[in-house]
Image: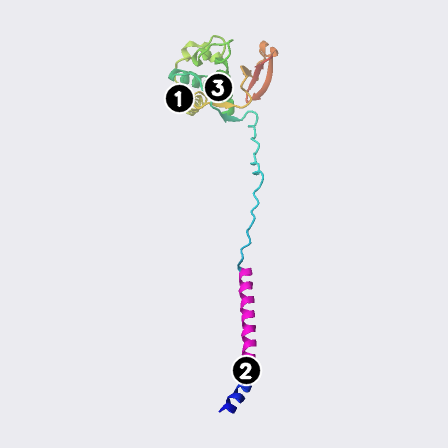
Amino acid sequence: MYYSEKEMKKTLLPWQLMLGIVYAMFMIYFIHSQSTAHAVTEVTPTVVQTPTALPKPIVLPVEKPKFLAIVDTNEKVLYNKTDVFCMAKNIYHEAATESKLGKYAVAQVTINRTKDPRFEDGICEVVLEPYQFSWANNRRMQWTTPRGSNWEESKRIARDVIVEGKRVYGMHDVLFYHADYVRPYWARAKRRLAQIGAHIFYEPRV
């Protein structure tokens, strides 16, 4: 029995040593793998750079209307129903056969005169002022009501100018005009602006 245990111990000793080495290597591998896992799972903070200034907005240039274009404005004038009639009559008798622009130009002159101290204040007063518009010198024509498409267009343009504030761009200082087949004496003292159809329009000389 003694001999057998002694021999057995001699046999088991190398195996125990080998198991110890294997266990030690396993522990080294386990510790190394754990440290590597921790290193991989570490979160690196992300740095977000904030711009120091916001980009400036792009501002597109505003184009000016073309000379003598019909434009919308916010201009308001005092008027009543009779004033609209007087304006339509002036457009009709002065520019019934002229272009749309020619009709607006006559209306523009009428509006401009209401704001100038050399003329009357109201629209009807300007239109019916003696010796200004030739048709109005005939008293029998002043309050008659025309008919036809030209009259309907004249009424519409009168409302556009008085109520809606439509104007002819570039004619805000025009106070005078005449037909191109006459040469009035006063024209030499004015500054010629433009000719629209059969009418030549003038501004006062500064």
Direction front: furthest residue: 2
Q: What residue is shown with label 3?
A: 107
Residue 51, above or below 132: below
Asked whether the viewer can see residue 125, the reply is yes
The disc, 3 or 1, on the residue closer to the chain's N-terminal end is 3
Q: Quadrant of the C terminus?
A: top right
What's the CA distance linking mark 3 and mark 1?
Answer: 19 Å
Please tell me whether residue 66 is drawn above or below residue 116 in the rendered image.
below
- The amino acid type found where label 2 is placed reads Trp
Give the labeled residue for mark 1.
147
Residue at screen point 39% across, 15% down: 82
Q: Quadrant of residue 171?
A: top right
Q: Which residues are magenta?
A: 15-40
- Disc sitting over residue 15 in the figure: 2
Residue type at mark 1? Arg
Q: Secondary structure at mark 2?
A: helix
Give the numbered dot on residue 110. none
What sort of colour scheme is used for the picture?
Answer: rainbow
Residue ID at (51%, 24%): 101
Rendering coords of residue 113 (x, y %): 50, 13
Which is in the foreground here, disc 1 or disc 2?
Answer: 2
Label 3 sits on what residue type? Answer: Ala
